[in-house]
């Protein structure tokens, strides 16, 4: 078995064990967040499903706790001119589409927890580049598309290096650095650092 195949096999084992244990341990938090979302907006769904682009350009549905109003996607066109991110990303610090509960779960990154289901399915890994939206990939250069050479992750160098304060080009460089240096030890370091910065992050919006 080659080094790459050993790493791929070990990474998948870590993903399966980590996501299963995560869902088991965090089940109480899942219930708590779901109740908060339903109390604020009884008619809206608890989970939000969004089309994302994964390894080799394959599209899949990524799951999150819903943090925005039900018509968020329809209202996006009105807000594009207020984009605060460079390159093929949309970020807006005071996005009016975000609910009160949504602000809390985004601040603490609790909205990301349902992606553990994506890890179990194999669409995502615990660690890797963030999966972009199809409209973002449409603006990618050939260089940017190198981000899609590996399975996307729930966390990565971008999240533990500044997150929303980092521009698109810097994010691409961090992702390519990760792809070049990736290893199980590197993945574990990123996971541990993610846990340390998960709650109370000032860079999440």
Image: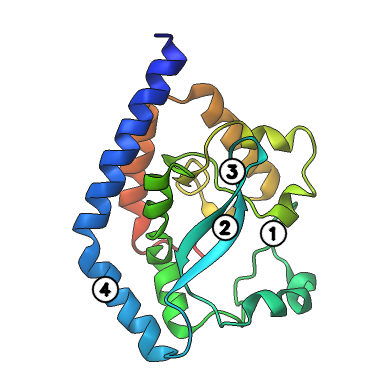
Vertical side of 77 occupied by 157: above or below: above
Q: Say which element carries label 4.
A: helix
For label 2, the residue is 164
Q: In the image, which is nearer the foreground, mark 2 or mark 3?
A: 3
Along the polypeptide, which appears first: circle 4 or circle 2? 4
Query: Alpha-carbon neighbours of circle 3 within 10 Å: few (<14), some, or many (≥20)?
Result: many
Q: Nearer the viewer, residue 190 or 125?
A: 125
**Quadrant assignment, res 12:** top left
| First along the sequence among labels 3 and 1 | 3
Measured as percent of width and height from the top left, residue 35 is found at 31, 82
> Which of marks 3 and 4 precedes in the sequence?
4
In this view, the mark in front (3 or 1)? 3
Mark in front: 4 vs 1: 4
Relative to 107, residue 98 above or below: below
| Residue pictured at 36% horizontal, 64% vertical | 200
Q: Residue furthest top?
A: 1
Pointer 1 with pointer 2, Cβ within 8 A = yes
Q: Nearer the viewer, residue 155 or 50?
A: 50
Q: Which residue is mark 1?
A: 85
First-in-chain label (1 vs 2): 1
Q: Decide: few, some or many residues near mark 4? Use Cα within 10 Å; few <14, some 14-19, many ≥20.
A: few
State which quarter of the image contains the N terminus.
top left
* Helix, strand or loop under label 3: loop
């Amino acid at each position: 078995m080659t080094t790459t195949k050993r790493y791929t096999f070990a990474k998948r084992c870590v993903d399966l064990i980590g996501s299963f244990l995560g869902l088991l341990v965090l089940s109480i938090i899942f219930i708590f967040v779901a109740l908060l979302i339903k109390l604020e907006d009884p008619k809206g769904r608890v989970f939000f499903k969004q089309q994302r682009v994964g390894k080799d350009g394959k599209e899949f549905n990524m799951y999150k706790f819903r943090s925005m109003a039900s018509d968020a996607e329809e209202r996006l066109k009105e807000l594009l001119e207020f984009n605060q991110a460079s390159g093929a990303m949309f970020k807006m610090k005071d996005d009016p589409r975000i609910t009160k509960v949504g602000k809390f779960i985004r601040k603490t990154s609790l909205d990301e927890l349902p992606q553990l289901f994506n890890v179990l399915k194999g669409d995502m890994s615990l660690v890797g580049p963030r999966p972009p939206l199809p409209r973002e990939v449409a603006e990618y250069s050939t260089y940017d598309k190198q981000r899609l050479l590996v399975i996307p992750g729930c966390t990565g160098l971008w999240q533990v290096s500044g997150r929303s304060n980092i521009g698109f080009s810097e994010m691409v460089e961090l992702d390519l650095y990760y792809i070049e240096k990736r290893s199980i030890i590197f993945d574990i370091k990123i996971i541990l650092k993610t846990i340390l910065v998960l709650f109370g992050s000032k860079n999440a919006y």
